[in-house]
C-alpha cells in the first residue's frame, strides 16, 4: 500500500494504455488537420519546460508540472480552436495533448509534492537505495 494515492497493477497498466490511446488519437487528429510535422516536433517537448519549477523545490515543481501536464489546458485550446476558429489554438492543443498522452504512456503521471518520482501512476525510476 502507498501513501501517495498512486495506482498499481492492472489499473496502472490501463491508465498507461489510456495514455497511449490519447497520444495516437491526438496525433491522428493533428495529421488529419494537415498541420506541419515540424511544428509538432518543435512543440512536443515544450510542456516539459515546467520541470524548471523543480528548481524552486518539489512543491513548486509539482505544481508547475501538473499545470502543464493536465488535459485542462490543451482541451481549452482545442475548444478555442474548434469553437473560436483559431487554427493555431487547435494545432497547439493537439500537440500539447499528444505530449501528455506520451508521458502517461511512459508512466510519468501527475506529481505529488513529495518529489518528482512520486506520481499518480506510481513511482517513476528506481527506488532510492539505502546504504548500510
Image (cartoon, rainbow, N blue to C red):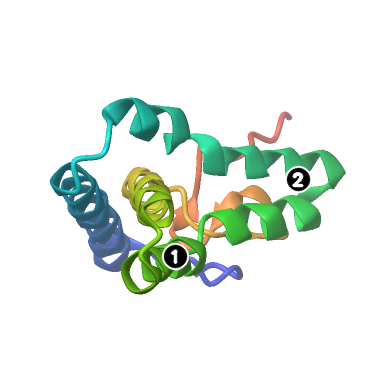
**Vertical side of 82 occupied by 104: above or below:** above
Q: Residue at x 50, y 44 (%)?
A: 124
Cα separation between marks 2 and 1: 19 Å
Q: Residue at x 40, y 70 (%)?
A: 84
In the figure, residue 49 lies in which quadrant? top right
Q: Quadrant of the C terminus?
A: top right
Q: Position of residue 8 (x, y in %)?
A: 37, 63
Is 71 left, or right, of 26 in this rendering? Answer: right
Q: Mark 2, residues whose alpha carbon is within 10 Å: few (<14), some, or many (≥20)?
A: some
Q: Which mark is residue 102?
A: none
SS class of the residue under badge 2?
A: helix
Q: Position of residue 89 (x, y in %)?
A: 43, 55
Q: Mark 1, residues whose alpha carbon is within 10 Å: few (<14), some, or many (≥20)?
A: some
Contact (Cβ within 8 Å) of mark 2 with mark 1: no
Nearest the eye: 36 or 117:
36
Question: Can residue 126 be seen from the camera position used here?
Answer: no
Q: Residue at x 44, y 65 (%)?
A: 71
Q: Position of residue 93 (x, y in %)?
A: 40, 55
Q: Which residue corresponds to mark 1?
A: 71
Question: Can residue 79 be seen from the camera position used here?
Answer: yes
Residue that lies at the very extreme toward the front in this rendered image:
85
In the figure, residue 12 lies in which quadrant? bottom left
SS class of the residue under badge 1?
A: loop
Q: Which mark is residue 53?
A: 2
Is 114 left, or right, of 78 in this rendering? Answer: right
Residue that lies at the very extreme toward the right in this rendered image:
56
Q: Position of residue 102 (x, y in %)?
A: 34, 44
* Total numbered circles: 2
**Vertical side of 41 occupied by 110: above or below:** below
Amino acid at each position: 500500500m502507498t501513501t501517495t494515492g498512486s495506482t498499481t497493477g492492472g489499473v496502472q497498466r490501463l491508465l498507461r494504455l489510456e495514455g497511449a490511446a490519447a497520444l495516437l488519437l491526438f496525433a491522428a487528429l493533428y495529421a488529419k488537420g494537415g498541420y506541419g510535422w515540424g511544428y509538432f516536433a518543435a512543440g512536443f517537448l515544450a510542456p516539459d519546460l515546467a520541470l524548471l519549477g523543480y528548481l524552486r523545490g518539489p512543491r513548486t515543481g509539482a505544481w508547475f508540472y501538473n499545470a502543464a501536464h493536465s488535459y485542462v489546458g490543451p482541451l481549452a485550446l482545442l475548444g478555442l480552436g474548434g469553437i473560436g476558429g483559431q487554427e493555431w489554438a487547435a494545432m497547439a492543443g493537439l500537440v500539447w495533448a499528444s505530449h501528455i498522452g506520451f508521458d502517461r504512456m511512459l508512466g510519468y503521471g501527475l506529481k505529488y509534492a513529495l518529489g518528482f518520482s512520486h506520481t499518480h501512476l506510481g513511482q517513476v525510476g528506481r527506488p532510492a537505495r539505502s546504504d548500510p
